[in-house]
Amino acid sequence: MAPRSPVVAVVGPGRDASAGDLASAESAGAAIAAAGAVLVCGGLGGVMEAACRGARSEGGTTIGLLPGTDREDANGWVVLALPTGLGEGRNALIVRAADAIVAIGGGWGTLSEIAFALRAGVPVFGVGTWELGRHGVSVAGVREVPDAAAAVAEALQTVR
Amino acid sequence: MAPRSPVVAVVGPGRDASAGDLASAESAGAAIAAAGAVLVCGGLGGVMEAACRGARSEGGTTIGLLPGTDREDANGWVVLALPTGLGEGRNALIVRAADAIVAIGGGWGTLSEIAFALRAGVPVFGVGTWELGRHGVSVAGVREVPDAAAAVAEALQTVR
Amino acid sequence: MAPRSPVVAVVGPGRDASAGDLASAESAGAAIAAAGAVLVCGGLGGVMEAACRGARSEGGTTIGLLPGTDREDANGWVVLALPTGLGEGRNALIVRAADAIVAIGGGWGTLSEIAFALRAGVPVFGVGTWELGRHGVSVAGVREVPDAAAAVAEALQTVR
Amino acid sequence: MAPRSPVVAVVGPGRDASAGDLASAESAGAAIAAAGAVLVCGGLGGVMEAACRGARSEGGTTIGLLPGTDREDANGWVVLALPTGLGEGRNALIVRAADAIVAIGGGWGTLSEIAFALRAGVPVFGVGTWELGRHGVSVAGVREVPDAAAAVAEALQTVR
């Protein structure tokens, strides 16, 4: 049997993704697949769909951990759709499944995934995502990088 | 039957709580109970224990949604201990159970609770907790207030 | 603070409960409350609602662990409604919350709760519920008792 | 992109599997993979490991939905290990992920999976597994078949 492939999660908004977020996500998905890693995501639209489309363009494996109970909710580029029935609680599963996280843009769901990852010690690489602070002092957590290619390159370096 | 009581969650660090966090939490718990509201929290130590102690000092009801499967993990001021077995995923349940959130200090777990709350539209009142931003622009979300009394007063005002 | 009260779960069908199931559930709820124990259940209709109504008639505390995310789904006799958002997965939480289970009638959801309880070593007392076997040999698990009063009496004896 | 592959779950005991259970599981896993379907299971030992070994002997894809949070808990024949952190609650996810269930032998965990599947309308094919009844009347649910080959054949027929 082949050694276990690295798993990288791409997280970001569904409905409210910007055009730039979608371009970053597609490029991140393609880079993950080209490197032989598995893409895991929330399986729905927006950043999730763009990342899956990118990964499939390179023949990669895409896993969608869906919030609902119906596999048909998955976008068309998800190879393996796992309905969790956990609602937003599935965000914790996405983080647990991944060796590293690429966060693109950022809604509240993305912030919850960043929080779970940093708590669990899973490295997070961000493209235009959340900046965190307390009492006016910024808190290091997400490593903001210039673009999706850099995010995936750094993510994979951490894993190997 | 009496009308349903408001439910306020107090969230914040366990192990890494500062002395100021603990004092705020105890004061928040007491104010919640004095107002006839129910306190829900994660049921463990630190901010959670201080909030429960405060609520019990006013004869309040305290609910602990525990990450593990053993009720004995609850701190001694939890009246109703519910072991969820969900690990950090129980943070989503704390948020769903509450009409409003008081966030004190802030570790990564607290940040995940803030994210879930803001996503679900549950108001969050903070005492020395996370500040959020994107691209150098701060994002309104947590309403930072000067102290625990103000946090509980504003939380209860939102509920009623 | 008062010592922690015993917690007894009443599980059984919602929609498909028979008149006998409902009568048993109401009587079980009343007996649980009369003994000073807390009732936990799934918070919806049928057996769950009848048990809560019985418990409230004796002034008891009733907790509903709801499958969805909306507290308004709870029946009118639930004092503390906790929306879990876990769908049927909340059945595992009901079992974890309880010192003993009273199973009345039985749909598939009830069977899942019996299975979780027996796996976790939580005693199950049944009134007209599932009988289990393998290879034609019956398997002891649920202790079938003649009526709800007996179920609650035996459940509370196990706890204390 | 290739059309989505059918997904079949094999469920059964870990530690307490009999030699016959293990032989059935290995044969079921091989038949699932030979038919081009994906195997999903709980990812640990016993029946789960035997099913994965069988599937890998035919070059199949094996997914392990682990109860804990550590991917290293997966048996060596799991290609894709997803730590859920849900404990026994992950049994609901296994059922949701599958088009059909093959149940072999049977502990309490297996019974919970059967219950979830029958509730969700997912067909269950059994080899030496639970028989169910109420009030002395047997309840149809699990379709008991003579061996693992028959279970997989019938499971795949339902899916397509």
Image (spheres, coloured by chain):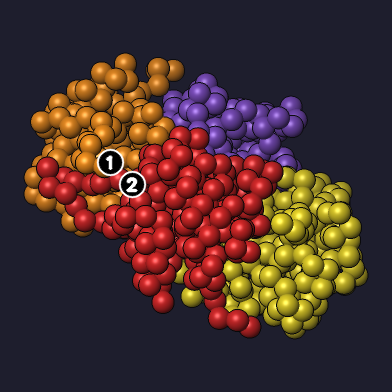
Chain colours: A yellow, B purple, C orange, D red
Q: Name the residue nearer the viewer: C12 or D28.
A: D28
Please give left or right for residue A122 compared with residue C37 in the image.
Answer: right
Contact? badges 2 and 1 (CB < 8 Å) = yes
Label 2: few (<14), some (14–19) or many (≥20) C-alpha neighbours in 10 Å? many
Residue located 50% across and 29% down the image: B70
Q: Quadrant of the C terminus of chain C?
A: top left
- Indicate the chain on which mark 2 is placed: D
Do badges 2 and 1 share one subunit? no
x and y percent of residue C132 in the render?
24, 40
Distance from the alpha carbon under mark 2 to that under mark 1: 7 Å
What residue is disc 1 on? C134
What residue is disc 2 on? D128
x and y percent of residue A83 in the render?
51, 64
Q: Secondary structure at mark 2?
A: loop
Q: Name the residue nearer the viewer: C77 or A54.
A: A54
Asked if residue B139 shows in the view, the reply is no
The residue type indicated by label 2 comes to Gly
